[in-house]
Image (cartoon, helix red, strand yellow):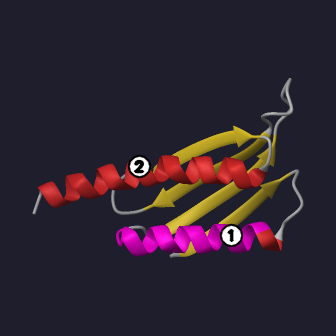
Amino acid sequence: MDINFEYNDVKASDELESVVIEKLNKLADKYEFLIKADVFFKIENTPTNETGKVTEIKLSMPGPYLFAESSKENFQISFADALEKVRRQAEKKKDKMQAHY
């Protein structure tokens, strides 16, 4: 699976990228229909320190893409939350695809 990163007002992190690549490749192994992932990291001004580090994940596949967003206190936690959201969507998509066979 092809993985693209985009950072908005955030310094790129090799450590963060390696974790993201590892987790997304595991997801791609489980869901073969995934083609490409776009991962966006950005900082938003929020009234609390518990949010503000935003991760967005967009997964391309045949048909409509899957999308999830999460805002937490750091990028690792927001990525894990967004990943779980797209994983659930991919599972539903896989179930629908199997129902047609």
Question: Residue 92 placed where, x, y %?
Answer: 31, 49
Write down the residue under mark 1: 19
Q: Residues within 10 Å of mark 2 (few under 14, many from 20)?
A: few
Q: Identify the image quadrant of residue 100.
A: bottom left
For label 2, the SS is helix
Predominant SS along the magenta part: helix
Q: Is residue 65 visible?
A: no
> 79 or 65: nearer the eye?
79
Q: Identify the image quadrant of residue 4.
A: bottom right
Question: Residue 9 placed where, x, y %?
Answer: 88, 50
Vertical arrangement, residue 83 with respect to residue 43, above or below? below
- 25 with respect to 4 (left or right): left
> Is residue 87 rendered magenta in the image?
no
Residue placed at 73% from the left, 40% from the top?
72
Whether label 2 touches label 1, CB < 8 Å: no
Quarter containing the C terminus = bottom left
- 71 with respect to 7 (left or right): left
Q: Amino acid at mark 1?
A: Val
Spot the residue most to the left: 101
Q: Is residue 9 visible?
A: yes
Write down the residue under mark 2: 88
- CA gap between label 2 and label 1 equals 20 Å
Q: Identify the image quadrant of residue 35.
A: bottom left
Residue placed at 70% from the left, 50% from the top?
77
Residue placed at 74% from the left, 60% from the top?
6
The magenta segment is 16-33
Residue placed at 66% from the left, 53% from the top?
79
> Is residue 28 rendered magenta in the image?
yes
Q: Amino acid at mark 2?
A: Arg
Q: Residues within 10 Å of mark 1 (few under 14, many from 20)?
A: few
For label 1, the SS is helix
